[in-house]
Image (cartoon, grey):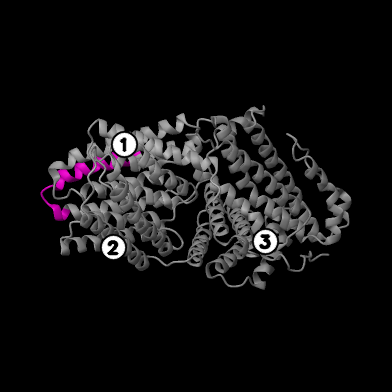
């Protein structure tokens, strides 16, 4: 096995921060110094920004949970049974709410829910010790936070700057490739999933924003430039897709005549300003009436794309520290990360699953009187809260259980074979290095290995003077841990359907609901929110299907474009447009097709053509532009529209 310098460095930083936290906690006489060590382990990350972000969220979650636990215990100290019920409801609610935030900020709510359980459940029969326990835990967590942050800052802090630059380069390169394929009229289904991979990669930046903000090596200008670039690229994807489908809808002869006009766009994509493209008159003269409408749409889409690309170029220059126009700089500094909408369905199902796990384990504890009841409840809730939201929660919880089982052996080795050999601080440091450094190297390549290290340290009686747990107590604790995880596995099986296919079906249902909602509310803000949610759903689908997405990737973008056009047509109707009388039946038919999802009918195509005929006769350019796009999106292979007077 070839161990890299970065792996050694990561392991060394874990070891150094954990030892520093331990000795500080012992020096000031804290009762559970292992909490500080475990905090160092779970907060460690190769990226300094991630360390600081998680440290902030852990402190906030622990402090909130501590204060809330004190208030709750003071209120219900004389009613332990009611306190147990209220604790389960409150912790389940907080943990479920963590799924509403799909960024690392959710860690704060996760820690709050777990800490409430750790405090109230473990000390439910000892309310007089609650205050001391809360203060001790907060102090020990703070020691761990300060230790890991100090060591990370002192020894080779890791920055996201190279990763950001690499991402931006990949985004722009892939976007250029996609755009150039569209300009050439290429619509190969085998490349669609690769194109939409850009969408997934760009949207994933939203999950890193909190990390970037706490990376001191990335200044605010660079950070905002990347965020603005992300927002701009997401905005451009529907336009590029519409442009590609419109060009592909032309005959091969018309495309050949159009291509020379598009060459300047390919060769000048690095310039700050690109002149608008004018399709030559001879291209129009040699085209059919339908193709003239398509060319008009292409003309508008091209110039919109040119404006969008100027912003991309400007934001790239801003990231490199080069001067740009003042209004573009202002736009970048005000940009916000692409929103990641919450999945309320998942949130509600997780609430039921977490509460069921808590209830079942609490019932086992109550009926058996098991002394390991608090540990039983805590680990079961942790298992479902941290691992139950994946597409395959059973597999994720099983992995968690497997690594928890491994931690039993590693804790036994540390607690009963290695630590009894300690006779001085020096020997303690040597033995802990022999244990933690290999574990840290393992954790650098497998995040769940960090779980083994954290659980191992939690299951060892770390005090100023080490005395191992009674072996029976140790084994009983391990059995309680595995029992809790097993109950979590059962609970998640009862509350959720497993598999990526089910998630995809859920995403499609949400897409249909949002499309239907646009029939009632279709102002600019509603359309903008719909586009954001739809693009996010596409990114989630691409992340699950990847290269197997195939032709479905084109359908996703087609549905998005059709929904945007339909909403804009409804906006025109709401302003008492002259064509409202003929647009209304068409939109009504389209709405019925969307609600029941049958195949698109010839009647709908006839209505679209009828509206194109009237808009062309009345020279309604805006309506023509929208109807042309709608016909291309819904009926890309239909015979070309022909005016009745031709």
Per the image, the residue denoted by label 1 is 22
Q: Is the residue under label 2 in contact with that under label 3 (CB below 8 Å)?
A: no
Dot 1, how many residues are within 10 Å of its Cα: few (below 14), some (14-19), or many (20+)?
A: many
* 510 up-or-down from 77: above or below: below
Range of the magenta residues?
59-82
Dot 2, how many residues are within 10 Å of its Cα: few (below 14), some (14-19), or many (20+)?
A: some
Q: Is 140 or 575 nearer to us in this picture?
A: 140
Asked if residue 136 can be seen in this view, the reply is yes
Per the image, the residue denoted by label 3 is 633
Q: Is 633 or 381 nearer to us in this picture?
A: 381
Asked if residue 144 can be seen in this view, the reply is no
Q: Which mark is residue 483?
A: 2
State the residue at coordinates (68%, 64%).
Answer: 608
Mark 1 and mark 3: span between their CA atoms? 63 Å
Is 123 contained in the magenta span?
Answer: no
**Secondary structure under badge 1?**
helix
Q: Is 81 or 589 nearer to us in this picture?
A: 81
């Amino acid at each position: 096995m070839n161990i890299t310098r970065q792996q050694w460095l990561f392991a060394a930083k874990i070891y150094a921060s954990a030892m520093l936290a331990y000795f500080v906690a012992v020096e000031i006489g804290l009762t559970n110094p292992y909490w500080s060590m475990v905090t160092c382990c779970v907060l460690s990350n190769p990226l300094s920004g991630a360390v600081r972000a998680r440290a902030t969220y852990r402190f906030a979650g622990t402090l909130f949970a501590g204060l809330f636990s004190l208030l709750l215990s003071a209120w219900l100290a004389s009613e332990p049974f009611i306190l147990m019920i209220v604790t389960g409801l409150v912790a389940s609610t907080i943990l479920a709410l963590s799924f509403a935030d799909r960024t690392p900020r959710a860690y704060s709510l996760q820690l709050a829910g777990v800490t409430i359980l750790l405090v109230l459940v473990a000390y439910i029969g000892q309310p007089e010790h609650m205050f001391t326990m809360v203060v001790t835990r907060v102090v020990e967590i703070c020691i761990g936070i300060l230790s890991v942050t100090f060591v990370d800052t002192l020894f080779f802090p890791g920055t996201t700057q190279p990763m950001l630059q690499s991402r931006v380069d990949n985004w722009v390169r892939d976007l250029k490739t996609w755009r150039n394929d569209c300009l050439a009229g290429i619509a190969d289904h085998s490349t669609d999933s690769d194109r939409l991979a850009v969408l997934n990669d760009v949207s994933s930046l939203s999950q890193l924003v909190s990390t970037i903000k706490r990376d001191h090596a990335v200044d605010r200008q660079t950070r905002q430039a990347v965020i603005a670039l992300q927002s701009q690229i997401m905005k451009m994807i529907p336009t590029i897709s519409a442009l590609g489908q419109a060009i592909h809808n032309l005959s091969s002869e018309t495309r050949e005549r159009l291509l020379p006009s598009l060459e300047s766009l390919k060769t000048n994509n690095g310039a700050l300003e690109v002149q608008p493209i004018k399709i030559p008159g001879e291209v129009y003269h040699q085209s059919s009436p339908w193709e003239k409408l398509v060319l008009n749409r292409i003309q508008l889409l091209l110039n919109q794309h040119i404006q969008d690309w100027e912003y991309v170029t400007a934001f790239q220059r801003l990231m490199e520290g080069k001067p740009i126009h003042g209004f573009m700089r202002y736009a970048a500094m005000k940009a916000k990360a692409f929103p990641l909408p919450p999945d309320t369905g998942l949130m509600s199902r997780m609430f039921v699953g977490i509460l069921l796990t808590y209830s079942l384990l609490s019932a086992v504890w109550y009926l058996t009187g098991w002394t390991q009841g608090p540990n039983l409840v805590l680990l079961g809730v942790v298992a479902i809260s941290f691992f139950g939201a994946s597409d395959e929660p059973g597999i994720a919880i099983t992995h968690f259980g497997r690594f928890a089982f491994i931690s039993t052996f590693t804790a036994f080795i540390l607690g009963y074979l290695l630590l009894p050999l300690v006779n001085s601080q020096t020997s303690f440091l040597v033995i802990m290095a022999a244990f933690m450094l290999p574990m840290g190297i393992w954790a650098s390549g497998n995040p769940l290995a960090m779980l083994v290290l954290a659980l191992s340290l939690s299951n060892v009686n770390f005090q100023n003077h080490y005395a191992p747990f009674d072996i029976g107590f140790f084994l009983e604790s391990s059995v309680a841990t595995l029992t809790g995880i097993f109950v979590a596995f059962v609970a998640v099986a009862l509350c959720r359907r497993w598999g990526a296919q089910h998630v995809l079906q859920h995403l499609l249902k949400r897409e249909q609901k949002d499309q239907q909602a646009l029939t009632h509310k279709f102002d600019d803000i509603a359309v903008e929110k719909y586009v954001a949610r739809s693009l996010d759903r596409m990114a989630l689908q691409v992340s699950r299907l990847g290269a197997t997405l195939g032709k479905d990737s084109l359908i996703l973008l087609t549905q998005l474009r059709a929904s945007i056009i339909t909403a804009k047509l409804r906006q025109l109707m709401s302003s008492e447009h002259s064509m409202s009388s003929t647009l209304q039946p068409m939109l009504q038919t389209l709405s019925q097709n969307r609600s029941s999802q049958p195949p698109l009918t010839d009647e709908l195509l006839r209505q679209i053509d009828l509206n194109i005929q009237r808009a062309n006769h009345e020279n309604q350019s805006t309506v023509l532009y929208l109807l042309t796009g709608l016909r291309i999106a819904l009926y890309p292979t239909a015979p070309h529209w022909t005016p009745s007077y031709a």
